[in-house]
Image: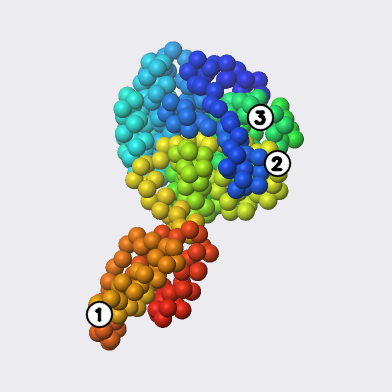
Amino acid sequence: MTLKRIQEAARRIASGVVVSPCPESIPLGEITGAQIFCKLDNLQRTGSFKERGARNALLCLDPERRQRGVIAASAGNHALGLAYHGRLLGVPVTVVMPDYAPLIKRTTCARLGARVLLQGRDFAEARAAADRLVASEGLTYVHGFDDPDIIAGQGTIGLEIISQVPNLDAIVCPIGGAGLIAGLAVAVKALKPKVKVIGVESHVTASFTAALKAGRPVAIPRQSTLADGLAVLKVGENSFALARTRLDRVVTVREDAIALAILRMAELEKTVVEGAAAAPLAAFLAGKLPELAGKRVALVVCGGNIDPAVLSRVIEIGLVADGRIARFTAVISDRPGGLAALSRVVAECGASIKDIFHDRAFSGPDVAAVRCVCTVETRDHAHVRELRRVLRRAGFQLSKP
């Protein structure tokens, strides 16, 4: 993989893949302490950077393979990219998705004209199913993160970032199978070797970190994550070989940080992102990148294909992590006025009751008392602590719900 090959891919895909914007985000800069630029590849037609590699790989096929069609195992974004550009280029596309693939990605992929098969509990099982169809139907398998043409296509995002952000200090990029960061790192280090390239993984799907420790790609146990696009159990051989010597650092982030980053992107950047795309910001919010304070940093916002049902839950998780939704259990009088007294104290403290539940069956032997489980809207963690202090001063016995 060379800079020339990535530059050729950029020329090849230019007619079908947009150059996504990379604007500065003042609000994200304020909360991170760095000068933040967001490479918004969630604005691609299918909502993901995967279109870059997909179109490049399809255009590199010989006429016979293009006529027979291609197949891939994918949790969604690679499948969407292949489906969309396969339709534009007249190439039949089959995708095999593991059972955790988000509903929005399944339905969109089918709407774009691909044959969608839901098989396997993880990527490895989906890949095995795809391999069987390769043998039986003569299809060409297009690997989502380890095919050289895919990696070259993904690397075009690095070319764009370098041209869009002068005097860049660092790029923070999510890592799943490592195809994106491998291509990006090859391009960036060839053009601007002093620009740091930092990878971010979910701590529950840290396959690149595991590969670094082992010295080679190794399989990790499957665990669920908000960042389904990063849920790859084993990084690609080619991707790992390219990235391991070019990355300056790799960090992992927890699920609550990813949820909070999704919330921050929606609130401050006014853009909806999936968990993988929120990972770079999550690394800042979790305090994993103190060395980038005051630096000019690009965040690779790689995709926006999050299931709306998941988004609503993630926002609530983010609000809890942010201290803007809290829950407590108070023992109150079960006589008239007991609940009113509790509500008055909560209101006077500036909080708002969102939900309330009376638990009489497990409130103990005192039939005149009842446990009241309250979910409240608050400003921040300091406000939650203040509310609990005020309630205790008012005579309410508090416990965890």
Label drawn at residue 165: 3
Give, as a three-letter code, the residue at label 2. Lys
- Report the residue at 63% width, 52% height from top: 288
Label 3 to label 1, Cα distance in Å?
65 Å
| Residue 74 lies in quadrant | top left
Q: Mark 2 — residue? A: 295
Q: Residues within 10 Å of mark 3 (few under 14, many from 20)?
A: some
Query: Disc 2, disc 3: CB below 8 Å?
Result: no
**145 shown above or below 139:** below
- Quadrant (top left, top right, bottom left, bottom right) of the C terminus: bottom left
Label 1 to label 2, Cα distance in Å?
60 Å
Give, as a three-letter code, the residue at label 3. Val
Q: Secondary structure at mark 1?
A: loop
Q: Nearer the viewer, mark 1 or mark 2?
A: 1
Q: Mark 1 — residue? A: 335
Q: In the depicted view, which residue is nearer to us: 144 or 253? A: 253
